[in-house]
Amino acid sequence: MTAKVFQLDTKPGVQRDGTVFDKDFYVDGRWVRFQRGRPRKIGGYAAISDQLTGPSRGVWVNPSNGFNQIFSGYNNGLQSLSVDNNGIGAGVADYTLNNFTANNLNLWQFDGFYDVGSGGVGSILAHPGNNLAQIDSTADTPVLIGDINGTTLSQIGTFTDANAYLTTGSPTVTLSQANILIGAGQTVTGTGIPANTTVVSKVEAADILSSVAVTGTAGQLSCTATSGLFVGQSVSVTGTTSPQALASVAITSTGGAFSCTATTGLYVDQPVYVTGTQTGVALSGVAVTGTAGQCSCTATSGLYIGQAVVVSGPFSGSATGISSGLTYYIIATDGTTTFTLSATSGGTAITTTAGTTTGLVFTVQQFTGVTSGTTYYITATNGTSTFTLSDSIGGPSLTTATNSVSGLVFSVPKNTGLTSGTTYYIIATNYSTTFTLSATSGGSAIATIVNSTTGLVFTLGSYTKVVLSNNATATGNYTLTFNNNVAVSGGVVSLHPYVFVYGNNGLIRNCAAGNAQDWVSTDANEVNVATGKIVQGLPVRGGSNAPSGLFWSLDSLVRVSYIGGSGTPPQFWRYDIITSQSSILSSQSAIEYDGVYYWCGVDRFLLYNGTVKEIPNNFNQNYFFDNLNYSQRQKVWATKVPRFGEVWWFYPRGNATECTDAIIYNTREGVWYDAGEALGARRSAGYFSQVFARPVAAGWEIPDVEIVFTQSMTTVSGSAFINLSTFNTQVVIGQVVSGANIVSGTTVSTITSSAIQTLGAVTGGSGYTNGTYTNVPLTGGSGANATATVVVSGGAVTTVTITLRGAGYVVGNTLSALNTNLGGTGAGFSIPVSNIFAQTIKLSVAASGSGTQVLTFSTPENRISMWQHEIGTDAVQGQNVLAIDSYFETSDLGWVAGGPPEPSMVGENRWLRLERVEPDIIQSEDMTLVVTGRPFAQSEDVDSEPYTFSPSTGKVDMREQRRELRLRFRSNVVGGNYQLGKLLLSATIGDVRPY
């Protein structure tokens, strides 16, 4: 054995460009990557589902609550698949797509968006563009949006208003509320709207109603004809109603009771305003009876201390001390016939002499208990003609005297049932002059009183007047649809909190912040920034100018940055041309990796890390571009595997029309390699999520339709259920079912077991209500969802006929039913399960006929697999586990190439004789080693027989010699895996001659 031991010195990466002899790197490989400069096998992949429709033309992953929603768009629709990080989860869900057109050219772009304007809904954005055949296709298609947890997507920027009032022959439409989403240029459709109608202008209004009157006792009002009356519209009432004077008011008791001419609107706690001057009463027979202001009069009522006594008229009597033209005040009285006067209220008595007061008139305002200029409150009333007053709300009644209140004015606010400072809501209207109010939106009508509303102000809530390009052809309230016509040829991206769309002629357009339906507010924008079509957009770190994004056109790279609405008029966005001398091979070929953006141009690979740079590639640039099926360029797509620092570009190689290979740039190692046309590179779309631990990718290979099995089965006309006595494990959801009495296109929807076949004897119970009851849920037992038709006669259950057989039952289960489903009375009914079906198949379409016939179960058409990559070491599909062929081949190790450890030729024109290889490999299962080489650079290689070695093999001895020698290591067994270490070779100089 030679004493010369060399370390394998081949450099990392697989160099395809150039000659084999002129390489220091690995010259060939399949499904191999490089880590720490050494080859290692790329991870395995497992099928998550084989039931997606394909080929997939776009994949996106949304992680949520430990699950990953995998969305896959294909030519005719969109599907989702929810799985955990182990690839286990629910089945495939189909989406309902509005404003979508199926097309074989559909190429999907996705993103997520948190739509604050739609109530805080996590949304999925999707754009199925007609771009699969041509990257520069100008066909505009709608951008779609929907609840990320739902199953429906519709065109973004499309919304409805359910309260739009039209008038025949008028272009003006009145909407019940202010609507910030409406703007000029939007397309409008709906009843009464002619085709091709658009919004011309919009005005927000909040009108004050005029000539409002209460017309009924149940909230009915009228007004001068106006617009803006809608069910649900708010009406704010302010102001104060003008007072209404009560007529013929009289005091009817000493306890504050009054009467008036019959009126409307008196109510408890109602204020009563007393104004005016009470009419005076002249006392008769007045005489001075003493020397200290004492007087007497003919008996009267209403004399009281503090009462003013006005003296007037020419005096001709004998008494002294009282003068005409003065006002005196009573300081003492018996209330009826005697009183003492003072010159001031509460003062001392005047000095008088007794005598007559002939010619003088003594006038007083009789006591009533009410005072002018005071507000009182009704504590009791009959609502029309009687009321009791207090000097405070809810206080004690006044003390009054039944004297005349002539000269005093008693006024009350007019009662309409409406309260100033309150907002009411319209619950009925003719949309012009009449409306009915409720205290709450959608509530019952308020109680009103037909009375004047003078002094009250009625203000409508904000509403919108929209002028259309065409006159309406109908009158009435209708639901209208407004469409911002967000349709583009490029795609969609979320730069939170904005949605951006892009396309022809450098178009970049965005919605308003946080509202994916608002494309008309001031921060929404539309601009053309390049001459070519924008084909891709990605978010980029913007710092103080966040959000920011990068947008690729066919020949340029544009950066968009938020600048916060500066300037007049306000500018929200800045558009910077990073380069106008660039290219992009495919709209799906750009990807971000740790803040650096990588993409494939039409003739080189590029990156952006603040500036655009070419990525040097001396490994496989020619290999890629010379062998790319350029007519299928739009099928090139990029993904990444951050664990190993890799960016992958999948592409169709040679004449392939789908991706058959992948070229890989290792950003960490700075080297290139490829998938070697491995089967794992046959993927049409994929995605890597930083939450989902492994990348996912969709295969494009569609297996031929195969008959899985045939079996004699019984169908019942109009029923979607087939029941089997034995369980058939070959039945799978999604299989196509064909045969007599089966409608074309029928598939298996669900599979259950242990459905009820027959029931035993009925225990009828008692007290039930006679009758026949259908679809009665059966209770009890181990299963669920069984229903029956139950007949009750004589108060007992007599017959039970199964209508739905349910699932999960066992023989001997005792079933019953709630008496609420049997007329509401009774107890004691039961029935046992006597036989069960082993399996129940539910079809997607009910059988068209009854009978027993042979049915065929086949695999569905156009089904593809969704794969989870970087898992295990093998290709796993269901129960099938296949080895993944992985190998790498070293550079030339011959003496003429410098020998194993040398960087250049040493001049020895000798063979290299290899005698031993010492594996240093982290290895699972057996591997093989083949020695290959040739005598001259352009001669054919000659391979040795494979040398097989196991993980425990210490050395591989051989006697192989080549003038130009290479080693090929291969793993191609189930469970096989490897990571190369420091490989040692024992070699010496061989023969001088060539072959």
Image (cartoon, rainbow, N blue to C red):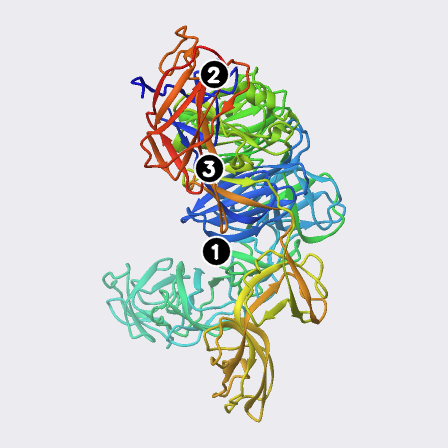
Q: Are marks 2 and 3 in contact (CB under 8 Å)?
A: no
Element on which disc 2 rests: loop
Circle number at residue 972: 3
Q: Is residue 381 visible?
A: yes
Comparing 84 with 917, the one in front is 917
Q: Position of residue 851 (x, y in %)?
A: 70, 72
Circle number at residue 931: none
Q: Position of residue 67 (x, y in %)?
A: 43, 48
Q: Tell me how far mark 3 sits from mark 1, CA to CA.
A: 87 Å
Q: Quick one: which residue is furthest to the top in this view?
A: 907
Q: Residues within 10 Å of mark 3 (few under 14, many from 20)?
A: some
Left-right relation of 569 to 300:
right
Q: On the image, which quarter does residue 923 sit in? A: top left
Circle number at residue 616: 2
Q: Tell me how far mark 2 sits from mark 1, CA to CA.
A: 78 Å
Q: Residues within 10 Å of mark 1 (few under 14, many from 20)?
A: some
